[in-house]
Amino acid sequence: MKRFLIPLAVFVVLLIFLAIGLTLNPRDVPSPLKDKPAPAFTLPQLAAADKSFAPADMKGKVWLLNVWASWCVSCRQEHPLLVSFAKEGKLPVVGLNYKDQPGDAKMWLAKFGDPYVLSAVDADGRVGIDYGVYGVPETYVIDKAGMIRMKHTGPITPESLQKQILPLVAELSK
């Protein structure tokens, strides 16, 4: 009888871990960059390859960095929300066009609308690696001092915009 207690106890412990794991959201991956300076970079702009963009250009502003690509299906899901949000003009949204062909990205923005004040071209994905991007879309809230205050993994939804992003932006804008 006792020899069955150890396997039963191990089974119960594994069952508890499984139950806890099933309640977690796999998209909620904490960013090690939260509350740290946004990685510096200088990249060409999508609309004007002769011009560049660096996060230092946004110092003094609270802004969003939205990582997107024309080949990204989930980006298409969040894009109408970004377009309508950008029309309100509450907050600058900078795009980071990730591992994409510039021609495809330009056609995609022409077709679906351009919510970005500008898009920087991360053709080889090196900047994405510095930011810990493991899939697109991802969105970062960056404060006036250039610190990452939030990472949102996956498409932004109206709920995440209203309940998480905008309250944080309001707090950071004070």
Image (tube, rainbow, N blue to C red):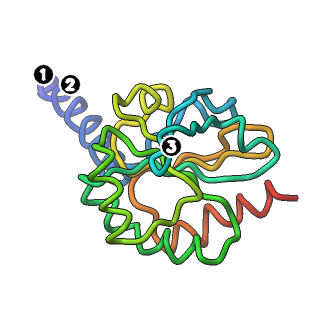
Number of numbered discs on residues: 3
Q: Residue 79's quadrant in the figure?
A: bottom left
Residue depicted at x 39% and y 54%: 154
Q: Amino acid at mark 2?
A: Ile
Chain-order first, disc 3 or disc 1:
1
Nearer to us in this view, 104 or 64: 104
| Label 1 secondary element | helix
**Residue 24 appears in the picture as rendered:** no
Residue hosting label 1: 3
Q: Quadrant of the N terminus?
A: top left
- The image shows residue 33, relative to residue 156, as above or below, that is above
Give the residue type that dot 3 points to. Gln
N-terminal label among 3 and 2: 2
Residue at image coords 64%, 33% = 38
Q: CA distance from mark 2 to mark 1?
A: 6 Å
- Res. 47 mark: none
Task: Name the spot of residue 172 as percent of width and height, x first.
Answer: 79, 54
Q: Provide the residue designation for mark 3.
A: 45
Q: Label 1: few (<14), some or many (≥20) within 10 Å?
A: few
Where does label 2 land, which residue? 6
Q: Nearer the viewer, mark 2 or mark 1?
A: 2
Between the residue at mark 3 and the residue at mark 2, the CA separation in whole angstroms equals: 61 Å
Residue at horizontal 24%, vertical 42%? 15
State whether residue 16 is above or below residue 72. Answer: above
Disc 3: CA contacts within 10 A as few (<14), some (14-19) or many (>=20): many
Residue 72 versus residue 135 in the image, above or below:
below
Measured from the top left, where is residue 11 in percent x and y?
19, 35
What secondary structure is found at the residue carrying circle 2?
Answer: helix
Q: Is residue 40 left or right of residue 137?
A: right
